[in-house]
Image (spheres, grey):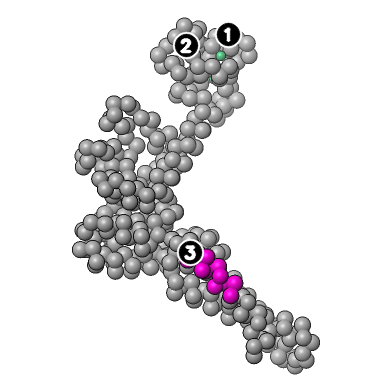
């Protein structure tokens, strides 16, 4: 009986009591009130039998909800790194605690909390398997202090990137350690990030890659010039020689191609460029923190690396100004 305590019947959704007469589905093991089982003549979750559902304490919908919540909670925990870093100095560097290092937070990731005597729901074990292993590996990357061939550690990179760690931890790992292909770890420079290309140059400014942002801004401006001139000549009914028209046509096609090409390139290689940028900046910051051993180092990494909304706004304005400038250029000349 005790294992059904606080669990609910799939038919009436009422929590079982000690005195209830309970029957268990022979196929999936879900407990029901005998009356409820009899009233519908089959298991209350028989719809889930086909997908192999087995009762482990939760009904299928409760299980999905718990998994979703645990996944969100876990994602939030990584995303909230900045707040963790700046709060309690004892847990500052390790949001979830490092076993054996600190009496106040001896809880490793996904371990039960023995501190307050109350067993806590193991958040991570509720995450379905493919996500769980991904999450565990991200967790390892964000806490890895060993410097790689590039001279920086996974932890430094993740603290510097500051936001969207789930994405960037995987990207950095692919660049630094390679990805499995045909059973072998192979180095890559490709990692898809559609924001990087589609929201260029705003995304580059947001991620503090000012030089790349300016380059992208100039490329998009210059690439659209032939089209703007062609449009303007037609609008003003200015007579052009046939060869001039065809030259402008070709140039504007080339411009479109360059614009599209740079978008695609950033979608594909944007994260690699960002990774190189992070490595350079981290090494520069580290010098001021006793080779990374000084207090406040990781906080400083996050502060100087984490994306900035203000910069995104400046990027949007710069993009608009560039568009306006290009549109008016024929008038100026
Ligand atoms: Zn019932
Ligand atoms: Zn069943």
Left or right: 293 as drawn, with respect to 230: left
Task: Say which element carries label 2.
Answer: loop
* Sequence-wise first label, 2 or 3: 2
Q: Nearer the viewer, mark 2 or mark 1?
A: 2
Depth check: give the residue in front, 120 or 130: 120
Q: Is residue 6 above or below residue 260?
A: above
Residue 310's tag is 3
Q: Position of residue 43 (x, y in %)?
A: 57, 17
Q: Nearer the viewer, mark 2 or mark 3?
A: 3
Q: Is residue 216 above or below residue 107?
A: below
Q: Is residue 28 above or below residue 74?
A: above
Whether tag 3 and tag 1 are in contact, CB under 8 A, the answer is: no
* Residue 216 visible in this rendered orientation of the protein: yes
Left or right: 160 as drawn, with respect to 235: left
Q: Nearer the viewer, mark 3 or mark 1?
A: 3
**Label 1: how many Cα within 10 Å (few below 14, some 14–19, many 20+):** some
Residue at 32% over, 26% down: 118
Q: Which residue is mark 2?
A: 17
Image quadrant assignment for residue 99: top left
Ligand 1 occupies quarter? top right
Task: Say which element carries label 1.
Answer: helix
Depth check: give the residue in front, 226 or 208: 208
Q: Quadrant of the C terminus?
A: bottom right
Q: Which residue is mark 1?
A: 35
Depth check: give the residue in front, 308 or 153: 308
**Label 2: how many Cα within 10 Å (few below 14, some 14–19, many 20+):** some
Cβ of disc 1 within 8 Å of ligand 1? yes
Gap between marks 2 and 3 measured at Cα = 57 Å
């Amino acid at each position: 009986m005790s294992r059904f305590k606080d669990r609910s019947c799939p038919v009436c959704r009422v929590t079982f009591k000690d005195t209830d007469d309970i029957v268990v589905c022979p196929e999936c093991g879900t407990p029901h009130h005998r009356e409820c089982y009899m009233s519908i003549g089959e298991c209350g979750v028989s719809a889930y039998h086909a997908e192999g559902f087995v009762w482990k304490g939760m009904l299928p919908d409760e299980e999905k909800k718990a998994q979703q919540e645990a996944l969100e909670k876990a994602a939030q925990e990584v995303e909230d790194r900045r707040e963790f870093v700046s709060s309690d100095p004892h847990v500052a560097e390790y949001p979830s605690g490092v076993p054996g290092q600190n009496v106040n937070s001896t809880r490793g990731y996904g371990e039960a909390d023995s501190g307050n005597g109350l067993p806590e729901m193991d958040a991570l074990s509720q995450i379905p398997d493919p996500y769980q292993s991904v999450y565990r590996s991200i967790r390892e990357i964000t806490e890895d202090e060993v410097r790689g061939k590039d001279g920086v550690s996974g932890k430094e990179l993740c603290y510097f990137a500051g936001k969207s760690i789930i994405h960037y931890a995987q990207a950095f790992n692919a660049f630094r350690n390679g990805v499995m292909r045909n059973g072998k770890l192979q180095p890559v420079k490709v990692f898809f990030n559609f924001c990087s290309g589609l929201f260029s140059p705003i995304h580059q400014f947001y991620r503090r890659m000012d030089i790349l942002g300016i380059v992208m801004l100039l490329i998009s401006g210059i690439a659209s010039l032939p089209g703007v001139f062609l449009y303007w000549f037609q609008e003003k009914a200015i007579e052009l020689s046939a060869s001039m028209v065809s030259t402008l046509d070709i140039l504007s096609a080339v411009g479109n191609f360059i614009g599209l090409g740079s978008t695609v390139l950033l979608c594909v290689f944007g994260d690699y460029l960002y990774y190189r940028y992070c490595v350079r900046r981290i090494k520069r910051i580290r010098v001021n923190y006793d080779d990374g051993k000084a207090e406040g180092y990781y906080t400083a990494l996050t502060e100087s690396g984490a994306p900035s909304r203000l910069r995104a706004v400046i990027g949007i304005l710069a993009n608009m100004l560039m568009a306006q400038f290009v549109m008016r250029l024929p008038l100026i000349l």
